[in-house]
Image (cartoon, grey):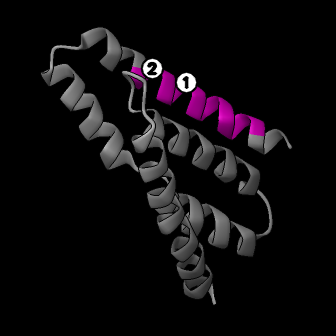
């Protein structure tokens, strides 16, 4: 049952991430990779909500949905690309914002 809940959550999280990513990229007017920032912060909030709750909800929304919805690899690659393009202030802003807002979002979700 655990694997099924994780698979269902991931089946929702991954396509939703793709749709949000594509929708924001089409209208991007920012120097930051705002789509990945938004996705990772929202996923952190969802994970915070499910933390210390019913195990089944944790498998479905925490491990499954949030795990497939968020992306460490895109975050790392986009940060690397910003540094490589010598956009250091943007890169540091992006890294700092993502980590700070992600932790705050998880804490806010957990407080609910």
- The stretch of residues the image draws in magenta is 94-108
Q: Residue at x 77, y 44 (%)?
A: 110
Cα distance between the residues tagged 1 and 2:
6 Å
**Which residue in the rendered view is the most extreme toward the top?**
89
Q: Along the line of sight, which residue is nearer the eye, 16 or 26?
A: 26
* Residue at position x 76%, y 43% in the image: 109
* Residue 110 located left or right of residue 112: left
Please say if 87 is above or below 75: above
Instruction: Mark 1 and mark 2 in contact? Answer it, CB < 8 Å.
Output: yes
Q: Would residue 66 be found to the left or right of residue 53 on screen? A: left
Q: Quadrant of residue 57?
A: bottom right
- Residue located at (58% from left, 65% from top): 65
Q: Residue 98 at x, y = what percent?
A: 48, 29
Question: Does the magenta run of residues contain 16?
Answer: no
Q: Depth check: 74 or 56 in front?
A: 74
> Which disc, if any, is residue 96?
2
Whether 37 is drawn above or below 4: the answer is above
Residue for badge 1: 100
Q: Is residue 2 above or below residue 46?
A: below
């Amino acid at each position: 049952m655990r694997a099924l809940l994780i698979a269902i959550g991931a089946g929702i999280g991954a396509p939703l991430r793709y749709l949000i990513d594509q929708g924001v990229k089409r209208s991007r007017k920012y120097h930051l990779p705002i789509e990945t920032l938004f996705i990772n912060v929202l996923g952190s909030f969802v994970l915070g909500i499910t933390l210390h709750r019913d195990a089944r909800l944790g498998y479905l929304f925490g491990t499954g949905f949030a795990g497939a919805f968020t992306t460490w690899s895109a975050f790392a690659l986009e940060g690397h690309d910003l540094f490589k393009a010598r956009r250091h202030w943007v890169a540091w802003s992006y890294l700092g914002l993502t980590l700070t807002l992600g932790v705050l979002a998880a804490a806010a979700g957990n407080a609910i």
